[in-house]
Image (tube, helix red, strand yellow):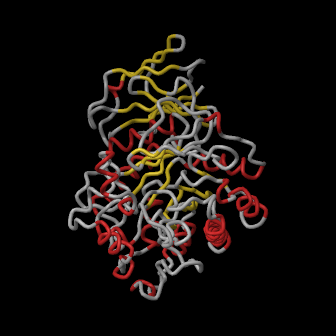
Amino acid sequence: MVEIVNGVHGTTDEKDVERDYGPEVAEHIEWFKDQKLGFMMHWAPGTQFGIVESWALAKSAEWEKKTEATWMTSQVNWVEDLDEFRESYVNAYKTFNPIKFNPEKWARMAKECGFKYLLATTKHHDGFCMYDSKYTNHKITADDCPFHTNKNADIVGALYKAFRAEGLGISTYFSKPDWGSPYFWSPDFPNKHDVAPNYDINEHPELWEKFVEYTQNQLFELTSNYGKIDVLWLDGGWVSADSIRLGEVIDKIRATTQPHLIVADRCGGGKYENFLTPEQHVPSQPLHMPWESCITIADGFAFGYDKDLYLKTPKTLVHLIIDIVAKGGNLALNVTPQPDGELPAKTLETLNEIGHWLKINGEGIYGTRPIAPYAHDEMAYTQKNGNIYAFLKYSHNYYPRRNAEIFVDKPVKDIVLLRTGESVPFKQDGKSVIINTMNFPLYDLKYADCLKVYF
């Protein structure tokens, strides 16, 4: 069973992943590696409670007390009876009416701030569908959801249309476990509120087969009714690919509607984990296969809306992007909208700062690949089209170091500071190149500079 620590998935070892994708998938993986920055979004009716999505439904208070894992229900501080809370949570869609939701505005913002693709929850572990699934009534378009009459009631469909119109890619988040399905947590058996099914699937194969059929049908409708899907991002690694016969689903999808489809079956290994997905952390060294870190814009396990959470600073996030890209990865930066459909104002301020920096320095980010020595001190490297990009990260926003040293393996012809578009003086001694940063102008100097090295 996959290891989950405080809600955070472990990461598959590279050696456990097969890389025989086929030519169309392999080509699309190169496209994915070019994108670098994804707009990740956890959003569902549960945001009305200001808690992490889904997780408080699982595990009993007794289990938390025994394991000291209080994070699941620590935010549920207004009621002592967890069964009472669960009933409120499951029925939260009946009061969910995000009338300020404007998918076109979100898509324009995402593009302006430097994002290249959307990764939005179509269905989280709670089983609530943010799209118009015909296989359940636990969905945003249900008649008893007040938002169902809105022109953008199919939130997933509206988002996909708007983001595609801005030229952005689509990554489809889907939870394999479904705690709202009677075929997963069956009412015919005692519910221990564990993350797994509440019955032995080997002893009750007919019940599990109903869940398999339900899951496969939802995967087919998402990949058939919502246009081009670049990535199928499957969460809930404790439900194995074999148990839901994922292979037959993916093979059929690739043979019909999505021949290029990249699949991230998180922690599954094998043929259908086409890239790794470290969560809330960055690998210490470059990986030798595609990867994407999913990290929240707020501190902590912030995969939910909480108006009181502290956001990471723009400097922290810019340095995070540089660190990830220099190691060959992408960043899926998670943002959670408000219950009314707006994006939080402080979040937008932070994203705009990142976008401004990327407008100046994005040439050294997008479409690049890692190159040794990758990073040292406060330097990090990328490469593209025969040039090297060297990033100088500043510990303080407005105080560049007196000297910067970069390492290259051939004679340098020119070095250009992207922020000004002008050449900077340097001295090369073998592989060492010294640049005096005191000559850098202070105008628009924020967080990090990018130096384009010509050979």
Front residue (pair 39, 176): 176
Residue 60: x %, y % from top left: 34, 58
Residue 281: x %, y % from top left: 43, 40
| In the displayed structure image, the side of residue 260 where residue 208 appears, left or right | left
| In the displayed structure image, the side of residue 246 where residue 256 appears, left or right | right
Q: Is residue 227 visible?
A: no
Residue closest to the far top: 429
Residue 389: x %, y % from top left: 51, 33
Front residue (pair 40, 222): 222
Front residue (pair 380, 147): 147
- Answer above or below: position of 379 versus 320: above
Q: How many marks?
A: 0
Q: Residue at x 55, y 51 (%)?
A: 237
- Answer above or below: position of 310 versus 443: below
- Answer above or below: position of 208 versus 447: below
Q: Residue at x 53, y 57 (%)?
A: 117
Residue 46's quadrant in the figure? bottom left
Q: Residue at x 40, y 60 (%)?
A: 58
Front residue (pair 332, 15): 15
Residue 13: x %, y % from top left: 58, 35
Image quadrant occupied by the C terminus: top right
